[in-house]
Amino acid sequence: MPPVRKVVEGAPASEIPSVDRLLHTRPFAALLAQHGRTRVTALLREHLEEVRRAARAGRLEAATLADGALAAALAARLTEAVRPPLRAVFNLTGTVLHTNLGRALLPEEAVGAVTRALTAPVNLEFDLESGGRGERDSLLEPLLCELTGAQAATVVNNNAAAVLLLLAALAPRREVLVSRGELIEIGGSFRLPDIMRRAGARLVEVGTTNRTHLKDYVEALGPRSALLLKVHTSNYAISGFTASVPLEKLVKLGRARGVPVAVDLGSGSLVDLGRWQLPREPTVREALAAGADLVTFSGDKLLGGPQAGLIVGRADLIDRLRKDPLKRALRVSKLTVAALEAVLALYRAPEFLAERLPTLRLLTRPPGEIEAQAVRLQPLVQRVLGDSYEVAEVPLASQIGSGALPVDQLPSHGLAIRAARGSRGALGRLEAALRALPRPVLGRLKDKALWLDMRCLECAEEAELVGQLDKLRLISPGAPA
Ligand SMILES: *Cc1c(COP(=O)(O)O)cnc(C)c1O
């Protein structure tokens, strides 16, 4: 029997087993079967290198060199390495259409359509009637026209792309008139003047920041004017001494001078949200009915679909957009076509929309249901956090997000978590610990409290959130990380 060596100074590097020997041991067989030799060998080399460094520093415990311990350490490494970087989170920020969290959640119908389009060949650009080449726009165009009253429609990668295409195709080296009050920047560096420059169009600013009148447009119009562009100021509101020109008047002017009028609605909506007692947002149909020649809007904002830029309006103008080479560069994939078609189809039965379309379902959740949820969660969260934190059930105001209706807020409920007096940095540690959960929980830090809004926690997901609370690892101050 070999003498039992007592580790005092740490195990020496010479005791570290070789990669080759380890790979032939029983604990490693399962890892090899699951992850393959290439991956296991690479990560094992990395791991043993770290072990060797620890040994040189005299920080190595003999127990960590056992085959089983090394296999367990490697299993943890492999799990971490295969975890996809894009992960599901809990959005308790109170912002329903959160751009950084992927905006709209899609309905089952869209998921099914995408799965089919991914796993079987599809008639994406194949005309099943004639047997000839088809056009991917033609799969969405009839439905978009039906829902908006437009003559024609086309779809690109997102609304920023829609605006870019519109400017590049209709106003190259010519002038586009925009009110100074509508020269917007959308989060993520979408600035209208920059897009305009890249599209090769010349921006002509009209009026002032707070007030623009019809006569300002009249004076700015000239022989080089190609387009009148109205932009829905979706992410801010100007209040006080303001004036802007209604679309109808702009249309009248455009018609008289032979200059088309385009509207970037941003979020836009296909239905009147007033139907569900939500704040009203201009609808695409209204903009077209008011005479807009083209309207652009996003697929993943209030529409509740996949990321896409939708352009609807006059057939001759849509045709010019289709013929522009940029259209090819900005085209959508079959995934988008499949998901968007499925979402648009839901709009044919608006009476079921609030049930079937997740975005609308979240926006219209009864405040009583959200409150009951917060009441249920308060004691559970308080128990997990202990007396270093104070958890209160509170009324909150959710936002629609993504620039839609920036001022209006929706009554909601949630938890306000404050650190007990004297524990500095405790709130930041809690926020980080929630982010480190298997499915990260994201709230909002503000005014020395962490706010968790329950609006976007659908009841079906509550158990998953509660189930992982016991994994919360709060590092107390002074404790080693
Ligand atoms: C959101 C928005 C855009 C950009 O749309 P994306 O789909 O995010 O590219 C453009 N214009 C307005 C007015 C917007 O609100």
Image (cartoon, rainbow, N blue to C red):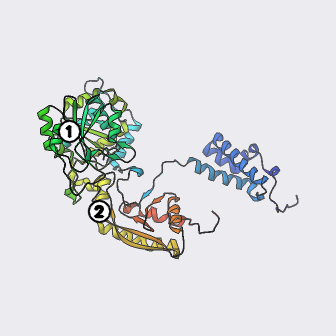
Judge from the rendering whether residue 210 lies leftward or rightward of residue 27; answer left or right.
left
Q: Quadrant of the C terminus?
A: bottom right
- Pinpoint residue 13: horizontal percent, then vertical percent: 80, 51
Mark 2–mark 1 distance (CA, rounded to whole Å): 31 Å
Q: Earlier in the sequence, mark 2 or mark 1?
A: 1
How many numbered marks have been drawn onto this rendered protein structure?
Answer: 2
Name the mark nearer the viewer: 2 or 1: 2
Question: Eyeballing the image, is 393 above or below 364?
Answer: below
Question: Can you identify the residue that label 2 sits on?
Answer: 410
- Type of amino acid at the residue the image marks with label 2: Leu
The image position of residue 204, as x and y in percent, is 26, 37
Residue 220 point in image, percent of width and height: 20, 36
Q: Residue at x 21, y 49 (%)?
A: 211
Disc 1 is placed on an element classified as helix
Q: Position of residue 94 (x, y in %)?
A: 37, 60
Q: Quadrant of the N terminus?
A: bottom right
Circle number at residue 145: 1
Give SS at disc 2: strand
User: CB of mark 2 within 8 Å of CB of mark 1?
Assistant: no
Q: Residue type at mark 1?
A: Cys
